[in-house]
Image (cartoon, helix red, strand yellow):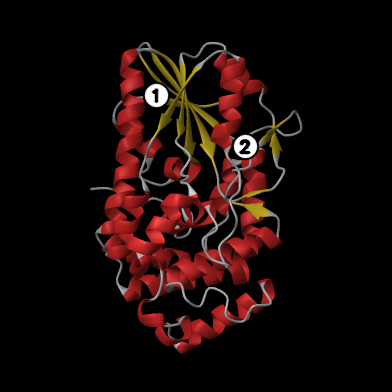
Amino acid sequence: MIQRLRLPAVMFVAVLLLGALSAGACRADVAPPSVMDEVVVTGERTGPEMWHVHRGAGHLWILGSMSPLPKGITWRSKQLERVLDSTNQVLIPKPFEIGIVRVLWLLITERDVLMLPGGRRLKEVMPPALHARFATQRAKFTHDADKWERYRPIIASAFLQQAAFHQVGLSTRLDLGAAVRTLANKHHVRVEELKIAGVRDFLDALKTMPPSTENACVEASLATIEKDLPRLVQRAQAWATGNIERINSLHEPAEVDACRAALDAGTGASDLIATLRRTWLDRMEKYLNGGGGTVAVVNIDMLLEKGGLLDELRARGYEIDPQ
């Protein structure tokens, strides 16, 4: 049985939102095209945790990534650079970005998935108390009282959450994979991009989502905005210093757990999460069984969750040493 993964709140929606809608401006309320920011690699901080997975001649060093992160965050690369000196390849997730032409096409062909049908508005489809909370938070981050009213609730709340992140200096677009790619190129190490899922996978998950699940995840986004931003900043700072104990001690709001439980109970989102996990495990085992050394950049929550990737690798007989 696939265990529940402690992924960031409404992870799949945020990925869809940032990778698709924010990639091109096709409406007045959609962000303009932007380049994914890179994590700055300097000598100022200890650096995120790494794990050394090994059995026989196969060696895998896993670097845990995190989102969101404070803009301009830095971490020390010395440990990773030493590992790269004896590495055959680097495995990073393929950036989830599409062009403006594809965005326009999606908003034409998949409008009912992303937007409210029939000209309806959020206040007509969301429970009154939930919409009141949404409107209160929206007023803090925009002067437009109608902003995002035409999007379906889970997309609108994801936009609002990104606006809140921006206000406190957090970003979901900082790309650890890009920083590691730069270091790999410096050390003449081959880089492989692992495609985890595409736009179609996320759209399919959205299509099968019932209103009750959508409302639960809107509540999770609002709870994150209302009371969880300081924790996210502290968590990112703990990541930058490799403090796993601190990361594990910073618990998410109950609303995020409720959203995740609702997603797990469905088919589309739970199948997608299972695919993410299975894809990483298959590729990591391929290189471990092939011998040599590999560095992989993997979401830290997928690693640390009970029954997650590290536990699964241990169950398959691999030794794992924190670095």
Image quarter where the C terminus lies is top right
Q: Is residue 100 above or below residue 186?
A: below
Return the x and y of residue 3 as percentages of the image width and height.
Answer: 31, 49
Name the residue located 57 percent from the left edge and 11 percent from the top edge: 85
Amino acid found under the numbered disc labelled 1: Glu
Q: Residues within 10 Å of mark 1 (few under 14, many from 20)?
A: some
Amino acid found under the numbered disc labelled 2: Gly
Query: Which residue is nearer to you in this view: 98 or 67?
Result: 98
Query: Which residue is nearer to you in this view: 243 or 157?
Result: 157
- Residue 221: give its label: none
The answer to whether residue 84 is seen in the rendering is yes
Q: Residues within 10 Å of mark 2 (few under 14, many from 20)?
A: many
Q: How many marks?
A: 2
Residue 59 left/right relative to 163? left
Disc 2 versus disc 1: nearer the observer: 2
CA–CA distance between discs 2 and 1? 20 Å
Instruction: Choose the circle earlier in sequence order: 2 or 1.
Output: 2
Q: The residue tagged with tag 1: helix, strand or loop?
A: strand
The residue identified by callout 2 is 242
- Residue 319: give its label: 1
The answer to whether residue 261 is seen in the rendering is no
Return the x and y of residue 199 as percentages of the image width and height.
Answer: 37, 50
Please tell me in which quadrant of the rendered image residue 72 appears: top right
